[in-house]
Image: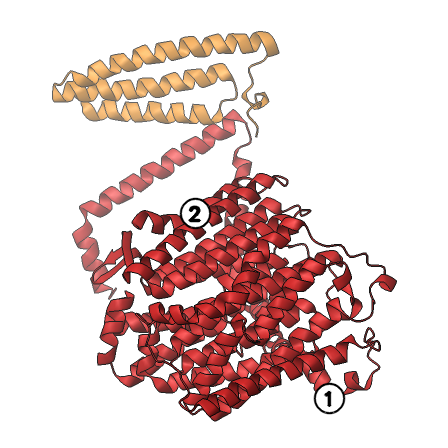
Amino acid sequence: MMEIGLNHYLILSTILFSIGLIGVMRRKNLLMLFFATEILLNSVNISFAAISHYYGDLTGQMFAFFVIAIAASEVAVGLGLLIVWHKRHNEIDLDLMSTMKG
Amino acid sequence: MELLLYTALFAPLVGSLFAALFGASPKTLLTGVVTSLLLGVSLVASTILLVFVISSGQFVHVEMMTWITAGDLYIPFGFIVDQISVTMMMVVTLVSTVVHVYAIGYMDHDKGFNRFFSWLSAFVFSMMVLVMSDNFAGLFIGWEGVGLCSWGLIGFWYKKESATWAANEAFIMNRIADLGMLIGIFLIYWNTGTLQYHEAFAAMPALETATLVWIGIFLFVGAMGKSAQFPLHTWLADAMEGPTPVSALIHAATMVTAGVYLVVRSHELYALIPNVGLFIASLGTFVAIFAATMALVNRDIKRVIAYSTLSQLGYMFAAAGLGAYWVALFHLMAHAFFKALLFLGAGNVMHAMSDELDPFKMGALGKTMKGTMILMTLASVALAGIFPLAGFFSKDLILEVAFIDGHYIIYTVLLLTAGLTAFYSFRIIALIFHGEDRHTSLGFHPHEAYKFMLIAVTPLAILAVIAGALQGSYYEYVTLLLPSTEYHIHSSLVYWTMTIGTQLFVIASIIFAYKKYMSKSVKVPDGTSAMEKSFFYKLLINQYYIPYFYEEYLVKPYRELSTVFWKQVDQKIVDATVDSIANVIYHTGENTRNMQSGNLSTMLKWMVAGLVALLSLAVVFGLATRHSDEIMLILSGLGV
């Protein structure tokens, strides 16, 4: 049985990050976009925790907690806005949100 | 004394700035009164300074502040009141005060009343800086200031095409001459290391003659422009487009005398180079007769008087060139009085005749305008040089100078000019005030000017009469500074023959003028008489075709050259370069604005693309810095 080392964690983190990035680019549903963002953030959290453990320095893990806290508040605000949007327009398709068009 | 000096100098500036505050508002009598009063203050201060300089024989010299210090160059704002500058100050402030008071009446109905007084006082201030400065740099500031103010005043009625044209002509002609002046000043600094008058002149005898000749010539080029000497004289007659008080000021006090002042001020320089002096005298003599002949036939009273100024300036330069600086200065002073008087009188006539300037259309105005007639006749008698008025003492002295120095050609020409002067002066007097009434049939209803305008000019009339009596005492005090050559003809027989001969000649000219132009047969010329068809008349009325020559051979080629440069160089190279830069930026913006579609999804894609681009850049640069040594090696191997 192979020992699970730092590299495995980093590879996992990279794979998750790529999935998140593709999600951000491809998804048209706003809710799905939030999911993709969460995947991005958590992939970074994995790197933080793994590298922190590798060096025996707690700073990285502390940082991961901060990221989790911020992600939670971001989702709270984001979902709130999303619900309001859905109530008004009855849809959450990204392509139909174009009030920022210059 | 310092306080007086500052008062004399800055009172006109204060007046000008005060009037400028109201520049855009409609006529307020206040500005005219305030500027005139401040000019009066300046006049009083100058008078006290004059008394001080006469009684003590000392200078007043102040250094207000440092202006430029850089390396060895040290130019202060210094002012000096000595015998020369105080004479000029008196002339300038006296004539200007009279002109200011007169202008309150003259510009009565003008919309630009306040603006006019602002320019007028600024004009006087510039001239005061010019004459009071103790160095060439300060003189140059005043010199340029006078040029600027003359531009503003000649082109005062800027809605008239001809006025703006004349203003530009005066300004440009003066700029050409100022270049010469500037080169002269540079040469002085180059060779003596200072611009202060007394230091520069003290260092000059040690210089080579060739250098001095160049300095003298270049300074005189500057004087030629300001004093409208041939070939830069055309602007002076065209400057008649300005309001008449301005003409009086330009001709008597604040502008054309600057050139004579410069030559007198630089007398120590010109004493070292008598050849240049002789050239100045010859040119002056030429201009004297040249201008007088043009005045003979002209049909515009202001232009006749302008040519007369030109001619009298020629006299002044003749005297200054021959080394008789105090005579030149004396003639300048006397001339200022009667010339200002003549112009202001002409202003009254113009007003009476609703701006008609052709004396042939007037006639018999003496009946309605007695005061003006007396004043103008007095001024003309003084100008002609009849004993015992001012012109007799100053102008005959110049003739004597030429005679004693043995320049008989100059003497003869100047004598002839004296006759011409008398003739053209009384030609217009006779045409305007005497003879048949020709104006009523043309629909003019002349009226005399305001009383206070006539009273305002009486000081000038008095001075035009009595200035000659001051000759002795004037000589006493001004020669403390200027070379004190007395001009006496030793043989009394020659002296009396000359004096009486000149007088008789002049009187004969006057009588001839009266006889010719008072007769009943004088009509408004219509181009049919034999005289008007003669070659000489055409030559003179067209000012020797010099303006035509300038227009045809200098202005037009220059304009065409400018057009070529405009179309070929400016539009095709300069403009094209600037435009192409602007176009690149414009098109970049045009093409990239599609990114801002407002679609969140697209924008996120662009964001990711930007992130990737920046990351790869960071990686590339990181690698490049880590491996810089190897890269340098490879590059040098490639021969870069």
Mark drawn on residue B535: 1
Q: How is the image coloured?
A: by chain
Residue type, numbered disc 2: Ala
If the image is split into quadrants, where does the C terminus of chain B sit?
bottom left
> In the figure, B585 relative to B440: above or below?
above
Q: Is residue B421 left or right of residue B369?
A: left
Q: In which quarter of the image is residue A86?
A: top right
Question: Is B26 positioned to the left or the right of A3 in the image?
Answer: right
Q: For numbered disc 2, what is the local secondary structure?
A: helix
> Residue B11 shows which numbered tag?
2
- Which amino acid, by three-letter code, is at mark 1? Phe
Residue visible at 39% across and 76% down? B325
* Earlier-in-chain disc, 2 versus 1: 2
Whole-number angstrom distance, CA of label 2 to CA of label 1: 52 Å
Q: How crowded is mark 1: few (under 14 residues within 10 Å), some or many (20 or more)?
A: few
Specify the chain shown as red.
Answer: B
The answer to whether residue B596 is above or below residue B84 is: above
Residue B211 picture location, percent across and down = 30, 81
Q: Give the chain letter at badge 1.
A: B
